[in-house]
Amino acid sequence: MADSQKSDLLLELLKRVDYNSVLIFCRTKHGADRVVGLLKRNNHAVAVLHSNRTQKEREQALEASAPAGLRCWWRRTSPRAGWTLRT
């Protein structure tokens, strides 16, 4: 799948799937930040977890993921991994 199609697919899946929370994995920190921006522009509550965040920012993201809080998560993973959507 082309990178240009992934954003559209992700947004469509989020529209169609009834979810409480979602974990999304990507290859790079830059890619994670880019997708977080996309999701925020589309009115999703989002937090990013990767090594460029302070420990306090990471803890706040985890706290926000309580059932009534965060709906989507984006996290950096290994270079070989693709996108994973979990509901």
Image (tube, rainbow, N blue to C red):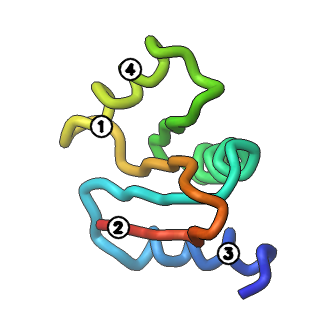
64 or 32, which is in the foreground? 32
Query: Quick one: label 4 or label 3, which is nearer the N terminus?
Result: 3
| Residue beneath disc 2 | 86
**Which residue is pictured at 25% across the width and 56% down the height?**
20
Q: Residue furthest left?
A: 67
Coordinates of residue 60 in the picture (x, y in percent) = 38, 20
CA separation in Å, label 1 and label 4: 9 Å
Dot 1 amino acid type: Ser
Q: How packed is label 2: few (under 14 Cα within 10 Å), some, or many (20 or more)? A: few
Q: How packed is label 3: few (under 14 Cα within 10 Å), some, or many (20 or more)? A: few
| Residue beneath disc 1 | 65
Question: Is the residue under label 1 in contact with that under label 2 (CB below 8 Å)?
Answer: no
Dot 2 amino acid type: Arg
Coordinates of residue 39 in the picture (x, y in percent) = 59, 51
Query: Quick one: label 2 or label 4, which is nearer the N terminus?
Result: 4
Indicate the secondary structure of the residue bearing disc 1. loop
Look at the picture and state if 24 lies above or below 63: below
